[in-house]
Structures are given as C-alpha cells and as structure tokens.
Image (cartoon, rainbow, N blue to C red):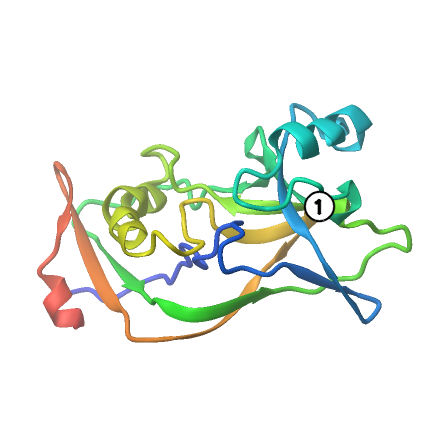
Amino acid sequence: MEEHAKVTLISHGIAPRNEGCKYTAIIDGEEKAFFPCMFEYTEMEDFENSDYIEMAITDYGFPYGFPDNVDADDCVWKPIGDDDFQHLGAKEAIAEGHAVIFEVIPYSSGTLHTSFEVANDFKLRDLKLIIDNPDTNEEYDLSWLYYCNVFGGIFDQNGDKPFDEDTIRAVDYKGERHDFHLDFQGGSGWYEVYEKEEDGWFPSYLKWMVE
C-alpha cells in the first residue's frame, strides 16, 4: 500500500450563532462586544451604502437569536452574495482508489482567535467573516464528500450547539484575509473513512486499521 497523505482542515466547528457563543474584539486593550450580522450585497460598494447597512440591521441581519437593536458600528458582517467571502475548499478531483480519513473531534468549549493591525479609523463593520461552504458541488470533491457523508451525522448530534455547515473560517479586513485559530477542550473523537470507487464514495475497511 502506498502511503502518502495531505492534512486538510474541514471545519473549526463554530458557526456564527448566538447560542452558547460570545463575540468580542480587543481594540487598544479594551474588550468590545460585536455581533455577526448577515449582509446581502451585489458589489463591494454596498458595504459603504448607508441604506444597505440600515436594511441589513433592521430587515435581515439577526436571524440567529441576536438582539435586534444593535448599532451598525457593533456589527461584523456575514456577507451573502458571491463567493468572495466563502471558503469552498480545494477544487480538485480525488483519484479513484484513494481513501479519505476524517478525524472528527468534538469539544466542550473552544475559542477562535486571530490578531492583526488596523487603521486609526477602524470600525468593527469594516470586518467581513469568511465562512465555510461545503454545500457547493461535486467539483469540490473533498468538501462535497464531507457535506454528503459526514456533516449530517455530526449536525444531528449537536442540534443545541452553534454548529452548522456555515462555520467560521477567517475574517477579511480591507481585502486581507486573516485565518482564525482554534483553542479547545474536549473529549474523544472518532474516524470516518471513505474510499473512492468507480461508482463514487463508499465506507472503507481501512477504518478498522485506523482505529
């Protein structure tokens, strides 16, 4: 058996939800709360349009249990539009005969964090979340395999937690991407192994070798 593998992060496991989550930014040493807010856009200029900002906050922004009286300057946008702020994974096919091993690690508590320098006129609404989107199409072989075969079982076990397909990957500030890092505490996980055959993906006997 030829042994070669590439490690790929599928998801940090935290979606922008209110249940059990706290969102803060430390600016000049001061901790400030913020709220992920959905923002529907068609072009980048929309993020500076006061009418679009007002509409995002009042009509569309907080479907996940956040307060409905948040100031625009306390929002971090979750853009809804093109793929600019979505992480789709690698657009490449996995060859027939290859296997994929998913290591699923549940955790009881976790923190996503990143740091970067900002301008003097920085506002929280200058930030845009970059979100995982595994529900794409078969051109993204690994993401599609995860979404079709692994995601549903994890989601069913975590219906009361801030886990979904749109987990947080990174944040954009003025066109620069800053990836989040995860610190967590948790219990034991498990493996799911799939092998690609001529007719598609199937569970693999290699799971017993991995475990």
| Residue 150: x %, y % from top left | 26, 50
Residue at image position (76%, 50%) is 124
Q: Is residue 138 above or below residue 121?
A: above
Count the marks: how many?
1
Image quadrant holding the C terminus, namely bottom left
Which image quadrant for residue 143?
top left
For label 1, the residue is 75
| Residue 43: x %, y % from top left | 69, 25
Left or right side of 149 for 207: left
**Residue 174 is at least partly visible in this image:** no
| Residue 11: x %, y % from top left | 43, 55
Which structural element holds mark 1?
Answer: strand
Residue at image position (64%, 27%) is 59
Residue at image position (34%, 51%) is 159
Left or right side of 9 for 49: right
Which image quadrant for residue 81?
top right
Looking at this view, name the residue that lies furthest to the right: 120
Residue nearest the observer in this picture, 21 or 118: 21
**Residue 128 is at least partly visible in this image:** yes
Residue nearest the observer in this picture, 10 or 29: 29
| Residue 106: x %, y % from top left | 34, 66
Task: Tell me the crowding category of disc 1: few under 14, some 14 to 19, or many 20 or more residues within 10 angstroms, Cα based.
Answer: many
Which image quadrant for residue 135?
top left
Residue at image position (33%, 47%) is 142
Image quadrant holding the N terminus, namely bottom left
Label 1 amino acid?
Cys
Left or right side of 121 for 82: left
Left or right side of 134 for 152: left
